[in-house]
Image: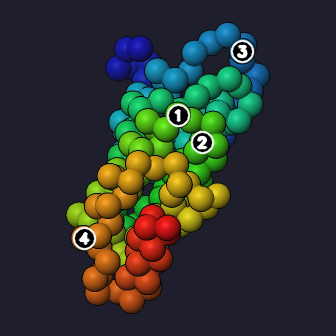
């Protein structure tokens, strides 16, 4: 897709709410939208990211699309700043929904990304608690490789008592 076409598409997405998802719903089923979705995630505009996440959620639910490693990395890359709570919420909801159908490799990649954010990011404590919830839903923690989860040991003495409590509970589940 050319740069001008991409700029036009982004302008339309900003001006017309839910345009992308409506176009996908009304469009033919045999078009592969994932290259476009992946390209749109590279742009920092929050409205484009929200619209693209909604479109991806629709594709994963209603078409035979599966989460792959590259797509999981792109989605995790959207969690950057504290002021993007809506993006964090949408990303985590999407990753949770996909955890039922995606491969163990993707689940492990998502777990690694979340643990990296927990250890190294400047996210506030509420955002970190929200990230921890990913492991608690439907026992996703049981699907993740134990080697990856052992990295949580570094966080067991976190200064926030709620994060410390949640991490210690997860570590206790791993030992069982």
Which of the two discs, 3 and 2, labels the residue nearer the N terminus?
3
Q: CA distance from mark 3 to mark 2?
A: 20 Å
For the residues bearing labels 3 and 1, Cβ distance under 8 angstroms:
no
Q: Position of residue 132 (x, y in %)?
A: 46, 67
Q: Residue at x 62, y 12 (%)?
A: 31
Secondary element under disc 2, as helix, strand or loop, is helix
Q: Residue at x 49, y 67 (%)?
A: 176
Tell me if mark 1 has few (under 14), some (14-19) or many (20+) residues whose alpha carbon lies within 10 angstroms of its own.
Answer: some
Q: Which residue is mark 1?
A: 103
Answer above or below: position of 173 versus 156. Answer: above
Q: CA distance from mark 2 to mark 1?
A: 9 Å
Q: Which residue is mark 2?
A: 98
Q: Which residue is mark 3?
A: 29
Which of the two discs, 3 and 1, labels the residue nearer the N terminus?
3
Q: CA distance from mark 2 to mark 4?
A: 27 Å
Tell me if mark 3 has few (under 14), some (14-19) or many (20+) residues whose alpha carbon lies within 10 angstroms of its own.
Answer: few
Q: Which residue is mark 4?
A: 154
């Amino acid at each position: 897709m050319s740069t001008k076409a991409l700029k036009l598409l982004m302008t339309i997405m900003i001006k017309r709410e839910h345009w992308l998802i409506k176009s996908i719903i009304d469009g033919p089923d045999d078009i592969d939208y994932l290259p476009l979705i992946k390209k749109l995630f590279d742009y920092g505009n929050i409205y484009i990211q929200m619209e693209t996440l909604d479109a991806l959620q629709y594709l994963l639910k209603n078409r035979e699309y599966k989460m792959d490693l590259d797509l999981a990395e792109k989605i995790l890359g959207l969690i950057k700043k504290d002021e993007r709570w809506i993006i964090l919420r949408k990303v985590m909801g999407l990753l949770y929904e996909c955890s039922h159908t995606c491969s163990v490799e993707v689940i492990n990649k998502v777990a690694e990304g979340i643990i990296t954010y927990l250890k190294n990011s400047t996210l506030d404590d509420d955002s970190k608690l929200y990230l921890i919830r990913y492991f608690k839903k439907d026992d996703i923690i049981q699907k993740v490789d134990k080697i990856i989860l052992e990295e949580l040991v570094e966080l067991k003495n976190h200064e926030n008592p709620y994060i410390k409590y949640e991490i210690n509970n997860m570590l206790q589940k791993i030992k069982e």
